[in-house]
Image (cartoon, helix red, strand yellow):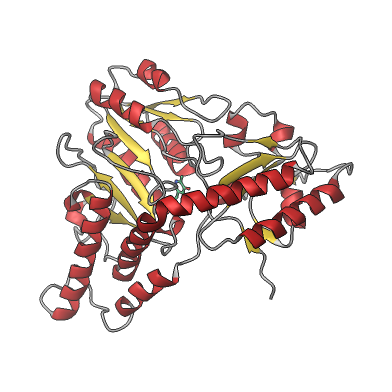
Amino acid sequence: MNMPIYLDNQATTPLDPEVLKAMLPYFQEKFGNAASVHHVYGREGKEAIEKARRFLAESIQARPREIIFTSGATEAINLALKGVAEKYRDRGRHIITQVTEHKAVLDTCAYLAHRGWMVTSLPVDSQGLVNPQSVAEAITRDTVLVAIMHANNEIGTIQPVQEIGIICRRENIFFMVDACQSFGKLDLNIKTMNIDLLAATAHKLYGPKGIGLLFASQKDPKVELQMQMEGGGHERGFRSGTLAVPLIVGFARAAELSLETKDEENQRLGELRDRLLTGIQDVYPEVVLNGSHYKRLAHNLNLCFPGLDGETMIMKMKRIACSTGSACSSASLEPSHVVKALGRDTELAHSAIRFSLGRFNSAAEIDKAIAEINRVAGDLKGKKITRRRVHAGGIE
Ligand code: PLP
């Protein structure tokens, strides 16, 4: 089968062959359970995990014991938000977040709101940026946690986490950062950024799916968490369950590769991204860029195509694989909550498409993608798009 060009690297990335190489022994001869420390099989697994933990911790200036391995970022975010909220319920029941967060944050906040917590969801400006001053103004005596993402998964906007971290530290409030899209891609330093909790996942940086981490500060400040998983007390009681040795090894190797190549990769992908934008704008100057021009991930391009329907376009662009937004909410027929938050009307928001580039994309692929996008947009221009409607019997 002739596979389409993959431009959906913010949904997930292909595994880097180097990562697979590092993981393979831990599926085969080194298969031990890392908790079985009485024999060499178990010890091999444990040593591999601790090495990976040290590397991942150091990459963000954390201590190894501050890293909790989870099944992914969704679980890490649940543990952070529910864990802090429940542990500090007597201190206060107010959480601050913002409207363009991933559903992992928004839905966990909704869960807490349903159970009596007060959640403030701050607006963003037309570029998707949160104003740090609005965080300061939203803080009350009841606030225990601020959760703001580092880089957005749909529009690539990079939030001013450093400034927000200063405010949270000054006010003695925990600061959680969803760093799924920036881990291994942007500079991340929990100390200089005053981050107390941070979630990341391997599958956005050419690592395996099903493994993530939560950094939870253990000193200055010490963040306590209500555990969310009963069981064998793994991960110092924060997250029971047999550790996935091959996936953890793969996570660390993926992070190592990303950090080694971060600057040149950002440079290369930024150039390819601009080439893609220019190639489309040359034919359709009316396309609207979603997100910030400058405070933006190098590999993200999110565009509205006025008068067209994003989903119809995606279905027709058989030679490329991209999406309207977050893979996690793509089953929804509502337009992206992120694009809507920028102030776009529903019609325009329905025309949004995210192209996210990655390590294995070439300039030749981008040129083919430009041709495909322009061809399909041309075919659809002038045609009336009737959006599918949901009714009791399903989707028509
Ligand atoms: N947060 C952001 C910003 C994401 O992009 C994703 C990925 O879909 C997640 C959270 C959830 O990560 P995971 O797939 O590891 O649960």
Task: Where is residue 224? Give x, y as percent.
Answer: 20, 39
Is 396 displayed left or right of 66 in the figure? Answer: right
Give the quarter of the image for residue 261.
bottom left
Q: Residue at x 33, y 73 (%)?
A: 22
Name above or below for residue 102 compared with residue 1: above
Is 50 displayed left or right of 264 in the figure? Answer: left
Task: Where is residue 228? Give x, y as percent.
Answer: 29, 48
**Number of marks present in the image shown:** 0
Q: Residue at x 24, y 22 (%)?
A: 170
Could one spot residue 189 in this view of the protein?
A: yes
Could one spot residue 394 in this view of the protein?
A: no
Q: Residue at x 65, y 56 (%)?
A: 366
Give the quarter of the image for residue 322.
bottom right
Name above or below for residue 31 compared with residue 6: below
- In the image, 28 versus 285, the foreground residue is 285
Q: Which residue in the rendered view is the most extreme toward the bottom? A: 29
Task: Where is residue 315? Give x, y as percent.
Answer: 74, 56
- In the image, 357 versus 234, the foreground residue is 357
Task: Where is residue 144? Give x, y as percent.
Answer: 28, 27
* Quadrant holding the N terminus: bottom right
Name above or below for residue 273 compared with residue 124: below
Is 138 displayed left or right of 33 in the figure? Answer: right
- In the image, 9 versus 390, the foreground residue is 9
